[in-house]
Amino acid sequence: MPKAIIVYDTRSGNTGMMAKAIEEGMTEAGIEVLSRRTVGATAGDVKDVDAVILGSPTYHSDMIGSMKTFLFEMEKADLKGMVGAAFGSYGWSGESVQMMTDTMRHIFGMDVIEPGLKMLRRPDEGGLKQCREFGRRIAERVRQQK
């Protein structure tokens, strides 16, 4: 069974809600998913999976600090060609999703799904449905690579 990891952090719970719904969509599509907060994740967690999905809220026009730290940790793993995707919530600007996407594509050489998924504030039921659909899109890309 294909495997994926979702590594995320959340400040007010919104990005965490998104992570859970993305995981549901991927699981429904037949992908084994492990979810980790950035603080507990290591480069070893991303080595033996088929996809890495990163989630961070935008805070003061930037990624949350723990995600920046994890991106340095990810550099220890060979991720070239692996499927990647980014998501996050925001209050007024939303830059973190593109920052994570650019890092995965240009620094790690990953096959990144674009556009990433960003949501204004707390996702409602319609937003959670979009998250589950995003999870299914990621699962489809993983299957195409297999």
Image (tube, rainbow, N blue to C red):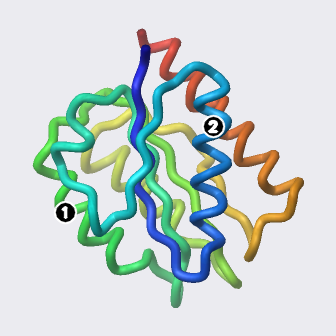
The location of residue 44, given as percent across then percent down, is 16, 43
Q: Is residue 60 left or right of residue 74?
A: right
The image quadrant of residue 38 is: bottom left
> The residue under label 2 is which amino acid type?
Gly
Give the side of residue 69 with respect to residue 11, left or right.
left
Q: Quadrant of the C terminus?
A: top left
When asked about the image quadrant of residue 100, the answer is: bottom left
In the picture shown, does residue 114 fall above or below 57? above
Pinpoint residue 133: horizontal percent, then vertical percent.
74, 37
Identity of the amino acid at label 1? Answer: Phe
Answer above or below: position of 25 versus 55.
above
Residue drawn at the location 81% of the way across and 46% of the way down: 129
Left or right of 9 in this view: 117: right
Which one is in front in this view, the residue at disc 2 or the one at disc 1? 2
Q: Find residue 88 and report its image quarter.
A: bottom right
Q: Quadrant of the N terminus?
A: top left
Q: Nearer the viewer, residue 48 or 95?
A: 48
Closer to the camera in the image, 111 or 26: 26
Q: Residue at x 63, y 37 (%)?
A: 135
Taking depth in this image into account, of 44 and 95 the one nearest to the observer is 44
What residue is disc 1 on? Answer: 72
Say which label, 2 or 1, has the lower sequence index.
1
> Whole-percent x and y of residue 16?
58, 64
The residue that disc 2 covers is: 135
Q: Residues within 10 Å of mark 2 (few under 14, many from 20)?
A: many
Q: Residue at x 24, y 71 (%)?
A: 69
Cα–Cα gap, marks 2 and 1: 25 Å
> Which element type, helix, strand or loop, lies under badge 2?
helix
Q: Measured along the vertical axis of the image, is residue 70 above or below residue 95?
A: above
